[in-house]
Amino acid sequence: MPQIDLKLVAAAALILGLFSGFYIDNTLLSKPKINSLTETVNQQESTISELEDDLQSFQSDYDTLEEEYTELSENNVPLTEYTTLQNENNALDTQINSLETEVNQLTDIVAEHTETIDDLKDELDELQDDYDKLLNKYEEAYNPLYVAYTVGDIEVNLTTAQDTFPENTAITGTVYIRYTNGTSFKGSFKLTIYKVYMNSGTSSEIYTINREKDYTWNSPFVLGVGSYKLSLSDIKDESGNLIVSNTALRSHVIYIFVG
């Protein structure tokens, strides 16, 4: 098996370390800020709703006083009652105007916070994309011959005999699957291989498995020389039931180099 370039591994590890620190710092700074702003927006929206209810109540009282005021004016009611209602009317009018101003101010604040939240979410998405790309590069530079993981209620271990192949060569290795409670897994699986950066590839034949299976996959490299990602797919039990989604399986890969 060709030797891994240690300088390349060290450089990739250093880059990943620096980038991971940058990513983590930004995540720690950005996510709490998003959460805080989201809570503020929710509180402000609740306050706006309460103020709008108050505004509606005041408006109703104002309309009632307006009717009484008109009725008293038309029936020549004594001036003292007329003046009292006029003062109450003016006071309610002032409260209504104040509430309308406060509602408008809070609405502007909510809009501003919402825009800030959207900007921070976009920033986090960009950081995540950059992190994923750098991690992809790192995994190409430092690539073990196996991947082990737990998904759903099964434990999986996928290995290959080597990570560098000539063209038109078979892939050989072992697949080990068991349930997390220790029970042996009996069923079937496929192997899937995708060319890196192309998101295109092919799948193998169906292999039956009883806890462990040595596999040989002839002519898997249909897209020629380059870097590939090998993973499992279509893990099914003896009854043909799909055990876990292929989307979850495709994130657990072994990198293979052809050419």
Image (cartoon, grey):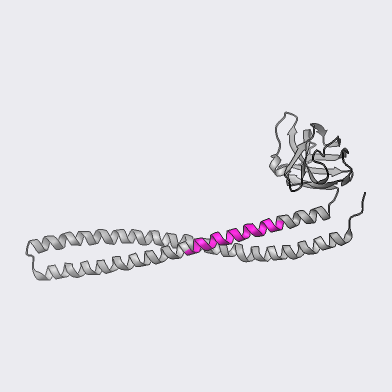
Q: Residue furthest left?
A: 76
Residue under the image location 73 percent in, 45 percent down: 198
The percent coordinates of residue 226 (x first, y second) are 82, 47
Picture coordinates of residue 231, whole percent (x, y): 78, 42
**Looking at the image, which residue is at 50% across and 61% down?**
114
The secondary structure making up most of the magenta span is helix
What residue sits 46% from the left and 62% below the top?
111
Assess whether residue 251 is covered by the magenta stretch: no
Left or right, residue 75 beside residue 137: left
Q: Is residue 126 magenta?
A: yes
Numbered circles on residues, count: 0
What residue range appears in magenta? 112-131
Instruction: Choose between 122 and 178: the one closer to the eye.
Output: 122
Q: Quadrant of residue 75?
A: bottom left
Farthest residue in the top direction? 239
Q: Position of residue 195 (x, y in %)?
A: 77, 44
Residue 96: image quadrant is: bottom left
Q: Position of residue 239 (x, y in %)?
A: 72, 28
Q: Is residue 58 above or below residue 139?
A: below
Q: For the point 74% across and 33% down, which residue is it?
A: 236
Answer with the quarter of the image where residue 166 lies: top right
Residue 30, above or below 221: below
Quadrant of the image for the C terminus?
top right
